[in-house]
Image (tube, rainbow, N blue to C red):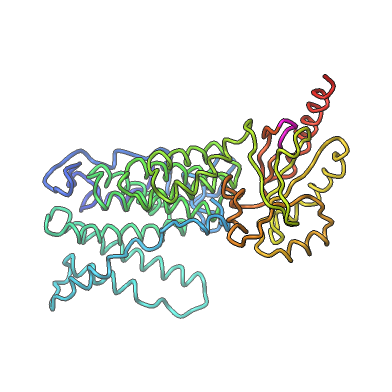
Amino acid sequence: MRHRHHISTVAACLLLVTQFGCGGGDNPSQTAGNPLDGKLEGTPASSQNTQQSSAGIQQVSSTAGPSLKPNVVQTASLERDKLDMDDLDSDAPSLANEEVKIQELKEGSAEWSVREITRLKVQALPKTENVDELRKARAARNKKIIQLAMEAVKQTHADKEKQRLFSVCIRHLLEAHLQLALEGDQESIDALYDHSESLFKRDPNSPSAADAGFTVAKFANTSAQRFAQQEPRWIEEFVKQSRLFASRFPQETIRAPQLLQAAAETCQLYGMNKQALDCCLDLEARFPKTSEAAQVAGLTRRLRLKGQPLHLAGETIEGGFVSIDDYKGSVVLVVFWATTAKPFIEQLPQIQALSKKYRKYGFEIVGVNLDEEEPAIDAFQEKTSLDWRQIFYSSRDKRGWNNPAALYYGVRSVPMLMLVDHTGVTEVVTSNAGELEEPLRALLRKKTAANAK
């Protein structure tokens, strides 16, 4: 049985219960059954702190990640995503200031509670280098914010004239629960999911419902960035919440596309290509005119590349021109790389070993370099004896991540490796050179058999 004293407080005094109407915009006069009856699949079964076991995610400590619904990586790729997930309270201070213009605020009123929340948020934490003390101080502040926000919601949810204030209180409530949830507080984890479901049932078109759904997605994304290495199911949870948010809130033409793009790119970094493609297709179908849809078009193309002809051509670093068509009859490995990319540098010996071992059987390599400066490439090639032909543009606006080949195939991390058979059809797309030798041998045998006919 889940511990629910924090939720029962909500049910008893205000927030996500039968006092809230279902549907009807912000009309508080409508009533319905308890929205807490509807649960998201995967909601944690217990709020007790336990250690992670082989049975699944059962842990809630701040060192290994919160328990529950699943784990997205902290990578340069995600840093480039435009997830506007910071501070759900963007309009809270202005509203607080607006309300506080009143000379006298009655203690215990909703307006007074909002003012007190604002004061708490700007109040300095204790000056100490003790991490545990700071964590406890932040937790105490967030719990006080939750208490104040709950009281304010109780007073505003049924007042048509105070629905904006109600929405701001909900934002404060969600943000405080989020901070506690990210510290592994199981009750706040449960509360985030419960509030999201209940507010959606109350009024699926309300800003509060969208904010709650977005907060859950933000929680999943942040947890995944922290803990995906230990528990990859957080990636699945991030995907689930991103797609759920997009389906429930089609009016969210900024936040929903950002979530879907981040989820797609996170999945492909972990080799979860099916989930990545699902997110891309969702994004292109629901928000086709957004910049995010345009940006994932290349990723969609790459995720569908296996079994399709590879389209690749461009200027070489020597000033010539190279095309994949120049290599018909050979098995070709296309390598997207950069001189400063540690994962590529670590895998380079494997790639060079494959070249040395199989070149005499008709194996070739073509590089697509994503550096900005040509001298860096020259120095690296000399140092590593790199002798592949390299696609690299003289025009500076076609260098780096703006390389046309990288844009066309949505390459946002390196190495990216594409193994093409002797007819020009792509057989393998991977970021791991260790996965190449077996399919390479098979393609060389296939080529030899075709030539013998």
How many callouts does the rendering have? 0
Residue 148 appears left or right of 77: left
The foreground one among 44 and 420 is 420
Please say if 71 is above or below 140.
above
Which secondary structure dominates the residues rendered in magenta? loop
Q: Farthest residue toward the top?
A: 453
Residue at 75% x, 43% y: name it: 434
Tell me if residue 45 can be seen.
no
Per the image, is 421 magenta? yes
Give the position of the C terminus as an image quadrant.
Answer: top right
Residue at 41% x, 71% y: name it: 137
Please say if 371 is above or below 439.
below
Per the image, is 38 magenta? no
> In which image quadrant can residue 338 be found?
bottom right
The foreground one among 202 and 142 is 202
Q: Farthest residue toward the bottom?
A: 127
Where residue 395 sits in the image (x, y, percent)? 62, 60
The foreground one among 264 and 138 is 264
Give the position of the N terminus as an image quadrant.
Answer: top left
Q: Which residues are magenta?
A: 419-423
Tell me if residue 440 can be seen.
yes
Residue 367 appears left or right of 169: right
Where residue 358 sits in the image (x, y, percent)? 85, 39
